[in-house]
Image: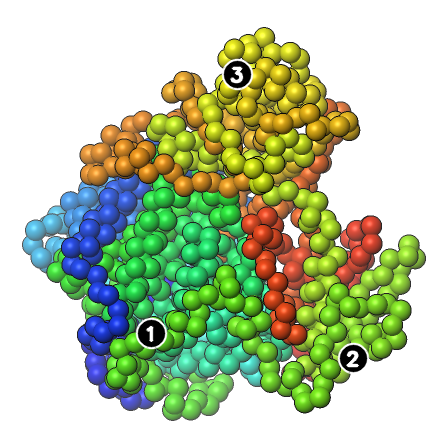
Amino acid sequence: MSEAGGRGCGSPVPQRAPWSLVAATAAICLVSATSVWTAGAEPMSREEKQKLGNQVLEMFDHAYGNYMEHAYPADELMPLTCRGRVRGQEPSRGDVDDALGKFSLTLIDSLDTLVVLNKTKEFEDAVRKVLRDVNLDNDVVVSVFETNIRVLGGLLGGHSLAIMLKEKGEYMQWYNDELLQMAKQLGYKLLPAFNTTSGLPYPRINLKFGIRKPEARTGTETDTCTACAGTLILEFAALSRFTGATIFEEYARKALDFLWEKRQRSSNLVGVTINIHTGDWVRKDSGVGAGIDSYYEYLLKAYVLLGDDSFLERFNTHYDAIMRYISQPPLLLDVHIHKPMLNARTWMDALLAFFPGLQVLKGDIRPAIETHEMLYQVIKKHNFLPEAFTTDFRVHWAQHPLRPEFAESTYFLYKATGDPYYLEVGKTLIENLNKYARVPCGFAAMKDVRTGSHEDRMDSFFLAEMFKYLYLLFADKEDIIFDIEDYIFTTEAHLLPLWLSTTNQSISKKNTTSEYTELDDSNFDWTCPNTQILFPNDPLYAQSIREPLKNVVDKSCPRGIIRVREESFRSGAKPPLRARDFMATNPEHLEILKKMGVSLIHLKDGRVQLVQHAIQAASSIDAEDGLRFMQEMIELSSQQQKEQQLPPRAVQIVSHPFFGRVVLTAGPAQFGLDLSRHKETRGFVASSKPYNGCSELTNPEAVMGKIALIQRGQCMFAEKARNIQNAGAIGGIVIDDNEGSSSDTAPLFQMAGDGKDTDDIKIPMLFLFSKEGSIILDAIREYEEVEVLLSDKAKDRDPEMENEEQPSSENDSQNQSAEQISSSSQEVDLVDQESSEENSLNSHPEALSPADMDNAASISPSEQTSNPTENHETTNLNGECTDLDNQLQEQSETEEDSNPNVSWGKKVQPIDSILADWNEDIEAFEMMEKDEL
C-alpha cells in the first residue's frame, strides 16, 4: 500500500541530503513523466475520465449508504443479509474478527475517503457521529495491528483533513482536535501491548483491561507476524508529532529496531512470524506478501514522513535482498531466510499486489510494470485476484475479499508513467466490481472466484482504500479540494501530512543501521529518480515491458517465467528425473533420488513413501531438482482422488431485485444432470409438499416446470430427486435441516446416490446449507416469485435487467436499498485473510452420522500437511507444457503443495507418520541454521 506524498524534484537525491531535498518522493517525482506517454497509446478523454470518476462516486454512495442505513453503528456491513456485523452476535470467524472492536470500524475507516471524494458535508456529519457514538473502552480483545492501521490511522487521517478544511474556512469551523484526542486515548490503550522484553508488541490487547489480567483474556501469546510488529511507526510517530507525546514514536521505533537486529544476516531477509519474547524466528520463510508486506512499506515511508536516513538504509538493504532472492520477474516467490536460493512455496498470495506500488515509490519501475501486468492477466482470467494462486496461475485459495492492493499499484503506476493503459485497467476493475460483486445492499466479497459465489462480508478497507485509489486514478488535480501531494498514504490509505517531519522532533535519531551492515552508495541512486533516466526517450517503454507478458497466464508455458538457474543446464547433463518416469525397482532412479536428497521407505503395508531433505542433496541444484520431483509426485499421487471429486456449483438469484447479483455456493450431486457438461437450468422456485420430498408430492401443480425446494433428512437424496422429477420439476435444491449451517463453516459435499442405478434421474440436483437456503426462502416470503439459475459457475447478468436496475444517482441508490431482504440466518466462519494457511472451500471433511439417511459423500481436500521448512518448485524442466485450464476451473489447490512427504497406493498416509516426518525435517533445518551461524 503505497505513497502519494511529495513536492516534486528532478535529479537523484544525494546520500543523506537535507530533509528539504528528500521530502519529495519517487512516486510524485514521476508524475512529471505523464507528458512522455502521448505517443503509442490512445489517451482517455476528459469526459470519459469524469464519467468513470462519477461512477466511482456512485459506487461509494451505494456501499457507504447501505452501511449507514443497515449496519451503523456496527463495525461492518453484511451485504447479503443487510445487517450489521457485531462482535459476539455472529459466529466467530477466528482471527479475522480481531479487527472488530465495537467502535464503528467502517465509519472511522471511511473518514478521509469522504474528503478525497469531495463529500465534505458527509465528512462533517460523520465526524460528529464518531464523537457522539464511538466508545473506545469496550471489553473486547482486538488486534493491535488492525486497530492501529484502521482505527488509529482513521482517526489521524480524519484529524489531518479536518484541520485542513477548518483552515480553508468553510467546513469544520467548530472542530477543536476532538478526533486527535480520541486517537491519543486509543494510543494509550495500545501501549500496554509493548510490555515485552523485546519491545515487540503482543498481537492482541483488551481495549478495557489491557494485557495479562485475568479479565483481559489475552497476553499469553508468544508469536506475532513481522508486519504486525513493524507496521506502527507512521501512525505512532504521527500521534507523537501531533500531540507532543514522544512515547508513541519511541515504542514504535524500538519495535522496528528489534526486527532489524533480528534479520538473517547473510540474506538480509526477515521471516513471517517471530517470538515476541526471545526474538527467534518461528516461520522462516520470507516474501513480500501476507505477514511481512507492510513492514517493508513502513521502512520506506518512515523515511519519507520522518526524514530519518536509517529507515531508508534499512529499506534499501532489504530491497536489495528482495530483488536478489524473492523477485523472479514477473513472480515474487517466498524463500527460506537461511537458504534464500530455495523457494519456500509454489504459490503467491494476493497481498503482494501492493508491491508494484511500493516499487514506484522506490523508483524501480521496470519490475513494477512486470509484476503488475502478470497480476492483471490473472484478474482478466478470474475477474478478481484470488487470495492465492500458483506459479502456473491455477487458483490456490479461491476467495477474494475485495482487496484494494492491485488498484493501489495501478494508481501509482499511472502516476509514474502517465500511460492511459492503466486507466483502462482501472475501468476493468470498476466493471468487474459492479458486474460480479455488487448486490442490492452493498458489495459482497467473493467466496469463490471460479463460481462467482459471494460471502456475506464487506470489509472496512474496501471503503477506506478501494474507492480512494479508483477515484484518484481518474481525477484531475482540480477535482480534488486539497493538494494530495502534501500527504503520505498509510498502509490503510489514510492521509498524514508531510509537514509532520519538522514538528516536535524530540526523538533521538541514533543511526543503528550502520552497526549491522555496510551499505554501498548505489543504494541511494534511485531515491528520487530523474524521469529522463526512467524513460529513455521511449514513449512506448512501459508497453514494451508489458507485451511479453500479455499471454503469460493463458497461453504461455509456466516454465518460461519461472527462474531456472543457469547451473541447472550444465553442459552434457541429463534432464532431471520426472515423477511420471520413476520406477522404484530401477537402481539408476534410486541413485538419482539419493543425489537429490530423497529417501525411499518401504512401509509394512506394502506402500512406498518418499521423504525429501534438502540438506542431504549433493548440491543446491540437486536439491531443487528433488523438490520439483516431490511436487510432481504429490500431484500424481493425488490425481485420482481429485478426479473423483466434483467442484462446487452455483445457485444464482436472477429475479428482481437481485438480477444475478446474489450467488450462493452449492454442493453437487453424483447423479442427475451434470451442470458442467450441459446448459444451466433456469426457473422459478417452489417448495415441495411434503417439504422433505420423501414421498409422492401432494402439490405437483406447484412444482411443475419449476425448481423444487426440498429439506434434507428422512430419506435418500436420490429418492427426493425421483419424487420431484415425477411431479414435473425441472431441478431440485436440497436445503440443510441443520439451522445456521453454512458453506463457510462446513465443508461442501456431493450428494451420493442410494446404491442403486440412478440413470433414471435426469434433472440437476444441488445442495445448499441452511444460511444460503434461508436467503432464497426469505426472498420467496418477500417477493413471492423468485427465479434462480443452477449452473457450474455464475453467469453474467442480463444486460436489460442491469440497465433497468442500475442506479443512476444517489437517490436511486437509496430507493434501491429500500428493497432488501432481511434475514436472521447466522453468519459464517471465514478464513483469516492475513495469516491463514487454509482454503475455506476445502476444509475438513464433514463427518456424517450413519443414522443420517441422506447418504452424502464429503468433498474434502487431498491430505493437507504443511511443512514450512521445505521448498517445492513446479518448473517444467523438459519444456513440456500442459493445458491446466480445465483443472483450474474444477480444483482449488490446497496446502498439499507444501508437503514434501508423499505416499501412494490405496491408503492415506497416517497422521503419526506425517508428524514424525515433519519433526524430522524441522530438526534438519535447525541443524542447517546452526551451520549457517
Residue at the disc numbered 2: 595
The location of residue 766, given as percent across then percent down, is 58, 31
User: Count the marks: how many?
Assistant: 3
Does 391 sit left or right of 484 as displayed? right
> Which residue is rendered at x = 16% and y = 48% of the image?
120
Taking the view exactly as shown, the residue that stands out farthest to the left is 169
- Disc 1 marks which amino acid? Ala
Q: What is the secondary structure assignment of the residue under circle 3? A: helix
Quadrant location of the N terminus in the rendered image: bottom left
Does 916 sit left or right of 803 as displayed? right
Taking the view exactly as shown, the residue that stands out farthest to the right is 604
Q: Which sits in the foreground, 155 or 714?
A: 714
Q: What is the secondary structure assignment of the residue under circle 1? A: helix
Displayed quadrant of residue 222:
bottom right
Residue at the disc numbered 1: 542
Image: 917 above or below 890: below
Q: Indicate which disc residue 703 carries.
A: 3
Lower sequence index among marks 1 and 2: 1
Observer-side mark, 1 or 2, equals: 1
Q: Are marks 1 and 2 in contact (CB under 8 Å)?
A: no
Characterize the local packing of mark 2: few (<14), some (14-19) or many (20 or more) Cα atoms within 10 angstroms: some
- Disc 2 marks which amino acid? Lys
> Which residue is rendered at x = 65% and y = 84% of the image?
569
Image: 313 above or below 876: below
Characterize the local packing of mark 1: few (<14), some (14-19) or many (20 or more) Cα atoms within 10 angstroms: many
Q: Are marks 3 and 2 in contact (CB under 8 Å)?
A: no
Q: What is the secondary structure assignment of the residue under circle 2? A: helix
Lower sequence index among marks 1 and 3: 1
Q: CA distance from mark 1 to mark 3?
A: 58 Å
Lower sequence index among marks 3 and 2: 2
Q: Which sits in the foreground, 374 or 820?
A: 374
> Which residue is rendered at x = 56% and y = 65% of the image?
391
